[in-house]
Image (tube, grey):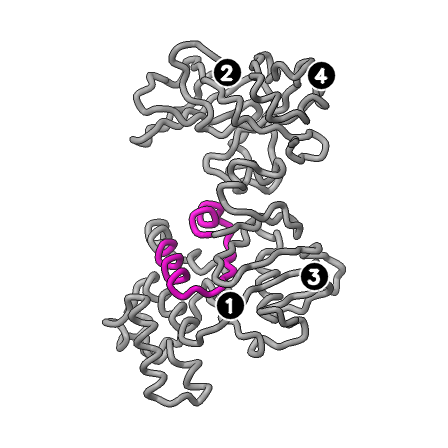
Amino acid sequence: MADVELEKVIKVYPNGFTAVHEVTLTVGDGEFVVLVGPSGCGKTTILRMIAGLEDITGGVIKIGEKVVNDLNPKERDIAMVFQNYALYPHMTVAENIGFALKLRKMPKDEIQRKVKEAAHILGLTEWLDRKPAQLSGGQRQRVAMGRAIVREPSVFLMDEPLSNLDAKLRVQMRSEVSRIQRQLGVATVYVTHDQTEAMTMGDRVAVLRDGYLQQYDNPQVLYDNPDNVFVAAFIGSPSMNLYEATLEPGATAVRIGSQTVQLTEQVRIARPALMRYAGRKVVVGLRPEHLPASTNGDGPELKGNVDLVEALGSELLVHFTIDAERVIAEGAHEEDAEDLLKSGEGVARVDPRASIKPGTTATFSVDVERMQFFDPDSDAAIRG
Protein backbone atom coordinates (compact mmCIF):
# COMPACT_ATOMS: atom_id res chain seq x y z
CA MET A 1 0.00 0.00 0.00
CA ALA A 2 1.18 3.53 -0.71
CA ASP A 3 0.18 7.13 -1.03
CA VAL A 4 0.73 9.39 -4.05
CA GLU A 5 2.19 12.90 -3.95
CA LEU A 6 2.36 15.49 -6.70
CA GLU A 7 4.55 18.52 -5.98
CA LYS A 8 4.24 21.43 -8.43
CA VAL A 9 3.87 19.07 -11.39
CA ILE A 10 4.04 20.72 -14.82
CA LYS A 11 3.43 19.35 -18.31
CA VAL A 12 4.51 21.33 -21.36
CA TYR A 13 4.21 19.73 -24.80
CA PRO A 14 6.82 20.25 -27.56
CA ASN A 15 4.57 22.79 -29.29
CA GLY A 16 4.75 24.98 -26.17
CA PHE A 17 1.25 24.23 -24.87
CA THR A 18 1.16 23.92 -21.08
CA ALA A 19 -1.39 21.24 -20.17
CA VAL A 20 -0.73 21.18 -16.41
CA HIS A 21 0.38 24.16 -14.30
CA GLU A 22 2.20 23.39 -11.02
CA VAL A 23 -0.39 20.99 -9.60
CA THR A 24 0.23 19.93 -6.00
CA LEU A 25 -1.92 17.32 -4.26
CA THR A 26 -1.62 14.22 -2.09
CA VAL A 27 -3.62 10.99 -2.26
CA GLY A 28 -3.51 9.19 1.07
CA ASP A 29 -3.01 5.44 1.43
CA GLY A 30 -6.42 3.85 0.82
CA GLU A 31 -7.99 7.14 -0.25
CA PHE A 32 -10.29 7.49 -3.27
CA VAL A 33 -9.48 10.77 -5.05
CA VAL A 34 -11.35 12.00 -8.11
CA LEU A 35 -9.92 14.39 -10.70
CA VAL A 36 -12.81 16.23 -12.33
CA GLY A 37 -13.21 19.04 -14.81
CA PRO A 38 -14.33 19.82 -18.35
CA SER A 39 -12.65 18.34 -21.43
CA GLY A 40 -9.08 19.56 -21.87
CA CYS A 41 -8.59 20.56 -18.23
CA GLY A 42 -5.54 18.29 -17.76
CA LYS A 43 -7.04 15.53 -15.61
CA THR A 44 -6.13 12.62 -17.91
CA THR A 45 -2.67 14.11 -18.49
CA ILE A 46 -2.11 14.09 -14.71
CA LEU A 47 -3.24 10.47 -14.50
CA ARG A 48 -0.90 9.47 -17.34
CA MET A 49 2.02 11.26 -15.66
CA ILE A 50 1.37 9.34 -12.44
CA ALA A 51 1.33 6.13 -14.49
CA GLY A 52 4.54 7.02 -16.35
CA LEU A 53 2.80 7.10 -19.73
CA GLU A 54 3.62 10.82 -20.03
CA ASP A 55 6.91 12.46 -19.07
CA ILE A 56 6.65 15.35 -16.64
CA THR A 57 8.20 18.70 -17.53
CA GLY A 58 8.70 19.86 -13.97
CA GLY A 59 7.92 18.98 -10.38
CA VAL A 60 8.02 15.70 -8.47
CA ILE A 61 5.77 12.64 -8.36
CA LYS A 62 6.13 10.24 -5.43
CA ILE A 63 4.50 6.87 -4.87
CA GLY A 64 5.00 5.54 -1.37
CA GLU A 65 7.53 8.32 -0.64
CA LYS A 66 9.65 7.15 -3.59
CA VAL A 67 10.30 9.62 -6.42
CA VAL A 68 9.11 7.95 -9.63
CA ASN A 69 9.79 10.74 -12.16
CA ASP A 70 12.22 8.61 -14.15
CA LEU A 71 10.73 5.16 -13.55
CA ASN A 72 8.91 3.37 -16.36
CA PRO A 73 5.28 2.27 -15.78
CA LYS A 74 6.00 -1.33 -14.77
CA GLU A 75 8.38 -0.13 -12.04
CA ARG A 76 5.75 2.09 -10.39
CA ASP A 77 3.55 -0.67 -8.94
CA ILE A 78 0.35 0.80 -10.37
CA ALA A 79 -2.59 -0.72 -12.24
CA MET A 80 -4.76 1.17 -14.72
CA VAL A 81 -8.40 0.69 -15.69
CA PHE A 82 -9.36 2.34 -18.99
CA GLN A 83 -12.74 3.34 -20.37
CA ASN A 84 -12.51 0.97 -23.35
CA TYR A 85 -11.92 -2.18 -21.20
CA ALA A 86 -9.21 -3.47 -23.65
CA LEU A 87 -10.18 -7.11 -23.11
CA TYR A 88 -8.83 -9.92 -25.28
CA PRO A 89 -11.89 -11.22 -27.17
CA HIS A 90 -10.52 -14.74 -27.70
CA MET A 91 -9.81 -15.28 -23.98
CA THR A 92 -12.26 -16.25 -21.26
CA VAL A 93 -12.98 -13.99 -18.31
CA ALA A 94 -10.58 -16.05 -16.17
CA GLU A 95 -7.84 -15.82 -18.80
CA ASN A 96 -8.31 -12.08 -19.19
CA ILE A 97 -8.13 -11.48 -15.44
CA GLY A 98 -5.06 -13.68 -15.01
CA PHE A 99 -3.17 -12.67 -18.16
CA ALA A 100 -0.76 -10.26 -16.45
CA LEU A 101 0.07 -12.92 -13.86
CA LYS A 102 0.74 -15.44 -16.62
CA LEU A 103 3.22 -13.01 -18.19
CA ARG A 104 5.00 -12.87 -14.84
CA LYS A 105 5.29 -16.69 -15.05
CA MET A 106 3.41 -17.10 -11.78
CA PRO A 107 2.50 -20.72 -10.90
CA LYS A 108 -0.85 -21.83 -12.35
CA ASP A 109 -2.40 -22.69 -8.99
CA GLU A 110 -1.45 -19.26 -7.66
CA ILE A 111 -3.00 -17.58 -10.73
CA GLN A 112 -6.20 -19.59 -10.27
CA ARG A 113 -6.40 -18.63 -6.60
CA LYS A 114 -5.97 -14.91 -7.30
CA VAL A 115 -8.43 -15.00 -10.21
CA LYS A 116 -11.06 -16.71 -8.05
CA GLU A 117 -10.55 -14.19 -5.24
CA ALA A 118 -10.94 -11.27 -7.65
CA ALA A 119 -13.98 -12.87 -9.30
CA HIS A 120 -15.60 -13.31 -5.88
CA ILE A 121 -15.05 -9.64 -4.99
CA LEU A 122 -16.46 -8.54 -8.37
CA GLY A 123 -19.37 -10.96 -8.55
CA LEU A 124 -17.94 -12.69 -11.64
CA THR A 125 -17.54 -16.23 -10.32
CA GLU A 126 -20.24 -17.75 -12.56
CA TRP A 127 -18.90 -15.95 -15.64
CA LEU A 128 -15.27 -17.09 -15.54
CA ASP A 129 -15.66 -19.41 -18.55
CA ARG A 130 -17.45 -16.83 -20.73
CA LYS A 131 -15.86 -14.74 -23.49
CA PRO A 132 -16.14 -10.91 -23.37
CA ALA A 133 -18.69 -10.89 -26.23
CA GLN A 134 -21.07 -12.83 -23.99
CA LEU A 135 -20.96 -10.23 -21.22
CA SER A 136 -22.83 -6.99 -20.58
CA GLY A 137 -21.00 -3.67 -20.50
CA GLY A 138 -20.99 -3.66 -16.70
CA GLN A 139 -19.60 -7.18 -16.54
CA ARG A 140 -16.85 -6.31 -19.00
CA GLN A 141 -15.94 -3.32 -16.85
CA ARG A 142 -15.71 -5.64 -13.83
CA VAL A 143 -13.37 -7.94 -15.77
CA ALA A 144 -11.14 -4.94 -16.54
CA MET A 145 -11.10 -4.12 -12.84
CA GLY A 146 -10.38 -7.75 -12.00
CA ARG A 147 -7.31 -7.66 -14.20
CA ALA A 148 -6.06 -4.72 -12.13
CA ILE A 149 -7.02 -6.24 -8.76
CA VAL A 150 -5.09 -9.51 -9.18
CA ARG A 151 -1.86 -7.58 -9.63
CA GLU A 152 -2.26 -6.27 -6.06
CA PRO A 153 -0.79 -2.86 -6.96
CA SER A 154 0.03 -0.04 -4.55
CA VAL A 155 -2.11 2.40 -6.56
CA PHE A 156 -5.15 2.12 -8.83
CA LEU A 157 -5.51 4.61 -11.69
CA MET A 158 -8.91 4.78 -13.42
CA ASP A 159 -9.53 6.81 -16.58
CA GLU A 160 -13.29 7.40 -17.03
CA PRO A 161 -14.01 3.67 -16.59
CA LEU A 162 -17.80 4.10 -16.58
CA SER A 163 -18.21 6.51 -19.49
CA ASN A 164 -19.18 3.78 -21.99
CA LEU A 165 -22.04 2.47 -19.84
CA ASP A 166 -25.68 3.55 -20.10
CA ALA A 167 -26.99 5.93 -17.43
CA LYS A 168 -28.69 3.35 -15.20
CA LEU A 169 -25.75 0.96 -15.23
CA ARG A 170 -23.34 3.82 -14.61
CA VAL A 171 -25.17 4.70 -11.38
CA GLN A 172 -25.06 1.05 -10.29
CA MET A 173 -21.36 0.71 -11.11
CA ARG A 174 -20.47 3.84 -9.15
CA SER A 175 -21.44 2.11 -5.92
CA GLU A 176 -19.76 -1.10 -7.04
CA VAL A 177 -16.45 0.62 -7.77
CA SER A 178 -16.60 2.50 -4.45
CA ARG A 179 -17.39 -0.71 -2.54
CA ILE A 180 -14.54 -2.62 -4.18
CA GLN A 181 -12.06 0.20 -3.56
CA ARG A 182 -13.01 0.38 0.15
CA GLN A 183 -12.71 -3.39 0.45
CA LEU A 184 -9.22 -3.39 -1.09
CA GLY A 185 -8.04 -0.24 0.69
CA VAL A 186 -5.76 0.83 -2.18
CA ALA A 187 -5.02 4.48 -3.00
CA THR A 188 -7.06 5.29 -6.10
CA VAL A 189 -6.97 8.20 -8.55
CA TYR A 190 -10.11 8.32 -10.67
CA VAL A 191 -10.68 10.63 -13.65
CA THR A 192 -14.12 11.77 -14.78
CA HIS A 193 -15.80 14.76 -16.42
CA ASP A 194 -19.04 13.98 -14.55
CA GLN A 195 -19.29 16.09 -11.39
CA THR A 196 -22.10 13.91 -10.00
CA GLU A 197 -19.82 10.89 -10.30
CA ALA A 198 -17.05 12.82 -8.58
CA MET A 199 -19.28 13.94 -5.72
CA THR A 200 -20.77 10.51 -5.04
CA MET A 201 -17.53 8.52 -5.25
CA GLY A 202 -14.62 10.61 -4.04
CA ASP A 203 -13.25 10.89 -0.51
CA ARG A 204 -11.71 14.06 -1.90
CA VAL A 205 -12.21 15.77 -5.25
CA ALA A 206 -9.72 17.85 -7.24
CA VAL A 207 -11.46 20.33 -9.55
CA LEU A 208 -9.33 21.31 -12.56
CA ARG A 209 -9.69 24.00 -15.19
CA ASP A 210 -7.29 24.73 -18.05
CA GLY A 211 -4.54 22.78 -16.30
CA TYR A 212 -4.86 24.66 -13.00
CA LEU A 213 -6.05 23.08 -9.76
CA GLN A 214 -9.06 25.15 -8.65
CA GLN A 215 -9.90 23.44 -5.35
CA TYR A 216 -9.09 20.16 -3.62
CA ASP A 217 -11.29 19.07 -0.75
CA ASN A 218 -14.02 16.68 0.32
CA PRO A 219 -17.21 16.85 -1.80
CA GLN A 220 -19.35 18.62 0.81
CA VAL A 221 -16.82 21.43 1.28
CA LEU A 222 -16.69 21.94 -2.49
CA TYR A 223 -20.47 22.17 -2.55
CA ASP A 224 -20.93 24.39 0.52
CA ASN A 225 -17.83 26.59 0.23
CA PRO A 226 -16.54 26.83 -3.37
CA ASP A 227 -13.31 28.79 -3.66
CA ASN A 228 -14.31 30.58 -6.84
CA VAL A 229 -17.08 31.11 -9.39
CA PHE A 230 -15.93 28.21 -11.57
CA VAL A 231 -16.14 25.64 -8.77
CA ALA A 232 -19.48 27.09 -7.65
CA ALA A 233 -20.91 26.69 -11.16
CA PHE A 234 -19.31 23.32 -11.94
CA ILE A 235 -20.21 21.48 -8.73
CA GLY A 236 -23.91 20.84 -8.22
CA SER A 237 -26.85 19.85 -10.39
CA PRO A 238 -28.78 21.99 -11.11
CA SER A 239 -25.98 24.50 -11.05
CA MET A 240 -25.69 27.32 -8.52
CA ASN A 241 -27.57 30.48 -9.49
CA LEU A 242 -24.92 33.19 -9.97
CA TYR A 243 -25.82 36.84 -10.56
CA GLU A 244 -24.15 40.21 -10.82
CA ALA A 245 -25.21 42.26 -7.80
CA THR A 246 -24.34 45.27 -5.65
CA LEU A 247 -23.84 45.37 -1.89
CA GLU A 248 -25.67 48.24 -0.21
CA PRO A 249 -23.73 50.61 2.11
CA GLY A 250 -23.02 48.90 5.40
CA ALA A 251 -23.55 45.52 3.71
CA THR A 252 -27.09 45.56 5.08
CA ALA A 253 -28.57 44.26 1.82
CA VAL A 254 -27.66 43.08 -1.66
CA ARG A 255 -29.33 44.45 -4.80
CA ILE A 256 -29.94 41.81 -7.48
CA GLY A 257 -31.36 43.49 -10.57
CA SER A 258 -34.25 45.66 -9.37
CA GLN A 259 -34.79 43.64 -6.20
CA THR A 260 -33.19 44.17 -2.82
CA VAL A 261 -32.51 41.23 -0.50
CA GLN A 262 -31.90 42.13 3.14
CA LEU A 263 -28.88 40.51 4.83
CA THR A 264 -29.08 39.48 8.45
CA GLU A 265 -26.72 40.52 11.20
CA GLN A 266 -25.58 36.89 11.37
CA VAL A 267 -24.37 37.15 7.77
CA ARG A 268 -22.37 40.32 8.50
CA ILE A 269 -20.84 38.77 11.63
CA ALA A 270 -19.96 35.52 9.82
CA ARG A 271 -18.54 37.34 6.78
CA PRO A 272 -16.78 40.52 7.99
CA ALA A 273 -14.87 40.69 4.68
CA LEU A 274 -18.12 41.78 3.01
CA MET A 275 -17.70 45.24 4.56
CA ARG A 276 -14.82 45.88 2.15
CA TYR A 277 -17.32 45.50 -0.70
CA ALA A 278 -20.03 47.75 0.74
CA GLY A 279 -21.36 49.94 -2.08
CA ARG A 280 -19.49 47.83 -4.66
CA LYS A 281 -20.38 45.16 -7.19
CA VAL A 282 -20.15 41.49 -6.22
CA VAL A 283 -21.24 38.15 -7.63
CA VAL A 284 -23.84 36.38 -5.49
CA GLY A 285 -24.60 32.66 -5.61
CA LEU A 286 -27.53 30.62 -4.35
CA ARG A 287 -28.06 26.88 -4.63
CA PRO A 288 -31.53 25.94 -5.97
CA GLU A 289 -32.48 24.35 -2.62
CA HIS A 290 -31.76 27.67 -0.86
CA LEU A 291 -34.67 29.25 -2.75
CA PRO A 292 -37.73 27.43 -1.38
CA ALA A 293 -41.20 28.68 -2.25
CA SER A 294 -42.24 31.47 0.13
CA THR A 295 -45.24 30.60 2.28
CA ASN A 296 -45.62 33.42 4.82
CA GLY A 297 -43.86 36.47 3.42
CA ASP A 298 -41.44 36.69 6.34
CA GLY A 299 -37.75 37.22 5.73
CA PRO A 300 -35.75 37.97 2.57
CA GLU A 301 -37.48 37.08 -0.71
CA LEU A 302 -36.87 37.06 -4.45
CA LYS A 303 -39.59 37.17 -7.10
CA GLY A 304 -39.18 35.55 -10.50
CA ASN A 305 -41.21 35.00 -13.65
CA VAL A 306 -41.78 31.24 -14.00
CA ASP A 307 -40.76 29.82 -17.38
CA LEU A 308 -40.85 26.08 -16.72
CA VAL A 309 -41.76 23.70 -13.89
CA GLU A 310 -40.25 20.20 -13.81
CA ALA A 311 -42.18 17.84 -11.54
CA LEU A 312 -39.80 15.15 -10.27
CA GLY A 313 -42.08 13.57 -7.70
CA SER A 314 -39.99 14.38 -4.64
CA GLU A 315 -39.51 18.01 -5.68
CA LEU A 316 -40.24 20.67 -8.28
CA LEU A 317 -37.48 22.35 -10.27
CA VAL A 318 -38.79 25.82 -11.03
CA HIS A 319 -37.01 27.67 -13.84
CA PHE A 320 -37.53 31.41 -13.42
CA THR A 321 -36.22 34.70 -14.76
CA ILE A 322 -35.30 37.91 -12.95
CA ASP A 323 -33.97 41.22 -14.32
CA ALA A 324 -30.38 40.59 -13.26
CA GLU A 325 -27.37 39.51 -15.28
CA ARG A 326 -26.57 35.83 -14.90
CA VAL A 327 -22.86 35.09 -14.43
CA ILE A 328 -21.57 32.29 -16.63
CA ALA A 329 -18.34 30.50 -15.69
CA GLU A 330 -16.75 29.52 -18.98
CA GLY A 331 -16.33 25.75 -19.28
CA ALA A 332 -18.34 24.98 -16.15
CA HIS A 333 -21.41 23.77 -18.05
CA GLU A 334 -21.96 21.21 -20.78
CA GLU A 335 -21.67 22.83 -24.20
CA ASP A 336 -25.29 22.16 -25.11
CA ALA A 337 -26.40 23.77 -21.83
CA GLU A 338 -24.57 27.05 -22.45
CA ASP A 339 -27.37 28.43 -24.62
CA LEU A 340 -29.95 27.60 -21.96
CA LEU A 341 -28.28 29.87 -19.40
CA LYS A 342 -29.76 33.13 -20.62
CA SER A 343 -29.51 36.41 -18.78
CA GLY A 344 -31.46 36.33 -15.53
CA GLU A 345 -32.37 32.64 -15.64
CA GLY A 346 -32.36 30.71 -12.40
CA VAL A 347 -33.56 27.44 -10.89
CA ALA A 348 -35.28 26.86 -7.54
CA ARG A 349 -35.80 23.48 -5.90
CA VAL A 350 -39.14 23.59 -4.08
CA ASP A 351 -41.66 21.35 -2.34
CA PRO A 352 -43.66 19.26 -4.85
CA ARG A 353 -46.95 20.50 -3.36
CA ALA A 354 -46.17 24.14 -4.07
CA SER A 355 -48.74 25.64 -6.45
CA ILE A 356 -46.35 27.19 -8.97
CA LYS A 357 -47.29 27.29 -12.64
CA PRO A 358 -45.47 28.47 -15.79
CA GLY A 359 -46.40 31.99 -16.85
CA THR A 360 -46.92 33.20 -13.29
CA THR A 361 -44.78 35.15 -10.85
CA ALA A 362 -43.41 33.11 -7.96
CA THR A 363 -41.96 34.31 -4.67
CA PHE A 364 -38.99 32.45 -3.22
CA SER A 365 -37.59 32.70 0.29
CA VAL A 366 -33.86 33.46 0.25
CA ASP A 367 -31.59 31.61 2.67
CA VAL A 368 -29.16 34.51 2.97
CA GLU A 369 -26.95 32.65 5.44
CA ARG A 370 -26.18 30.14 2.67
CA MET A 371 -25.66 32.82 0.03
CA GLN A 372 -22.19 32.85 -1.54
CA PHE A 373 -20.29 36.03 -2.44
CA PHE A 374 -17.49 36.35 -4.99
CA ASP A 375 -15.18 39.13 -6.16
CA PRO A 376 -16.33 40.11 -9.68
CA ASP A 377 -12.76 40.75 -10.88
CA SER A 378 -10.86 37.76 -9.48
CA ASP A 379 -13.87 35.36 -9.25
CA ALA A 380 -12.51 34.33 -5.81
CA ALA A 381 -14.84 33.70 -2.88
CA ILE A 382 -15.14 36.59 -0.42
CA ARG A 383 -14.19 35.02 2.90
CA GLY A 384 -13.07 36.05 6.36
Q: Nearer the viewer, residue 382 or 287?
A: 382
Q: Residues within 10 Å of mark 1 (few under 14, many from 20)?
A: many
Q: Residue at x 35, y 78 (%)?
A: 114
Say which amino acid is labelled 1. Answer: Val
Q: Residues within 10 Å of mark 2 (few under 14, many from 20)?
A: some
**SS at mark 2 in the image:** strand
Which mark lies nearer to you, 1 or 3?
A: 1
Q: Is residue 262 part of the magenta span, yes or no?
A: no
Say which amino acid is labelled 2. Answer: Leu
The reply to whether residue 108 is in sight is yes
Q: Where residue 302 is drawn, which disc sits there? A: 2
Query: Going from the N terminus, do you reach mark 2 or mark 4 first?
Result: 4
Residue to which mark 3 is pinned: 11
Q: Residues within 10 Å of mark 3 (few under 14, many from 20)?
A: many
Mark 4 to mark 1: distance in Å? 51 Å
Image position of 145 with respect to 305: above or below: below
Q: Nearer the viewer, residue 1 or 302?
A: 1
Residue to which mark 4 is pinned: 279
Mark 3 to mark 4: distance in Å? 43 Å
Q: Residue furthest top?
A: 297
**SS at mark 3 in the image:** strand
**SS at mark 4 in the image:** loop
Mark 1 to mark 3: distance in Å? 21 Å
Position of 104 with respect to 176 (left or right) is: right
- Residue 154, position in %: x, y? 50, 71
Say which amino acid is labelled 3. Answer: Lys
Q: Where residue 155 is drawn, which disc sits there? A: 1
Position of 140 with respect to 65 (left or right) is: left
Q: Residue at x 50, y 16 (%)?
A: 302
Query: Going from the N terminus, do you reach mark 2 or mark 1 first?
Result: 1
